[in-house]
Amino acid sequence: MTTSIRRATPTDADLLSALAIATYTETFGDSYPPEDLAAFLHAHYSPEPQRRELEDPRSAAWLLFEGDHPIGYLAAGPNSLPHADAQEGDIELKRLYVLTSRQGVGHGARLMDAFLAWLDQPHRRTLWVGVWSENYGAQRFYARHGCQQVGSYEFPVGDSRDLEFILRRP
């Protein structure tokens, strides 16, 4: 089936919300108590937070479709990772998810290529990424795209705290 990528707009907030909740739950749903997961998903991935991000001119998101069906996305915006070297104007890759059933065939790389083309225009900007310390596949993926670990922090989901690595591509 044919795949396509397009830049998301504020009118995609509901679609992006549904995809974000589905992919996050699929990936990490068993990692947290149900009430923590539900509160986190509502606070961060419900339609209104997605709409705010999509309306922010410093942010961008791309949707990956297989035919007419959304199967993945990438969202980026102003860096919020806690690192002493972070500067105004740096960009954070906030989320890159592909449905589990569609992984392993290069979809993540296609989304990353679209994002990097945007990131580096009109000039190359510093990229920051937070990645779970136990997500070795994602760490290898970002390393292939020039990111190196430069720190760590705790990522809260309710009362749970995950050790996250801070990656940077200068």
Image: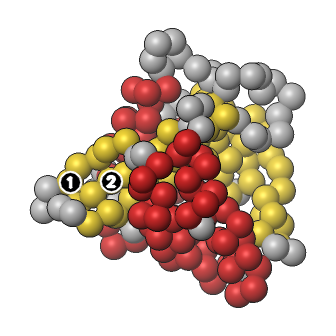
Identity of the residue drawn at 83% across and 40% down: 82
Which residue is the site of mark 2? 64
Q: How is the image coloured?
A: secondary structure
Q: Which mark is residue 161?
A: none
The spot of residue 115 in percent (x, y) is: 43, 35
* x, y percent for residue 99: 39, 68
Q: Is residue 74 visible?
A: no
Q: Is residue 147 above or below residue 138?
A: above
Q: Quadrant of the C terminus?
A: top right
- Up-down: is 168 above or below 152? above
Quadrant including the N terminus: bottom left
Of the residues under marks 1 and 2, which one precedes in the sequence?
1
- Using a 10 Å C-alpha cutoff, classify the residue at mark 1 as few (fewer than 14 neighbours), some (14 to 19) or many (20 or more): few
Neighbours of disc 2 within 10 Å: few (<14), some (14-19), many (20+): many
Q: Which residue is mark 1?
A: 3
Tag 2 secondary structure: strand
- Percent of width and height locating residue 90: 67, 26
Question: Relative to residue 26, is residue 106 drawn left or right?
Answer: left
Query: What residue lies at 42% left-to-right and 64% top-to-bottom?
Result: 15
The location of residue 3, given as percent across then percent down, is: 20, 54
Identify the amino acid type marked 1: Thr
Q: Residue 28 occupies which quadrant of the picture?
A: bottom right
Q: Is residue 77 visible?
A: yes
Image vertical order of residue 163 relative to residue 128, above or below: below
Q: Are marks 1 and 2 in contact (CB under 8 Å)?
A: yes
Q: In the figure, 146 relative to 9: above or below?
A: above
User: Relative to 9, is 156 on the left or the right?
Assistant: right
Kindly identify the amino acid type of the residue bearing the numbered disc 2.
Leu
Give the quarter of the image for residue 81.
Answer: top right
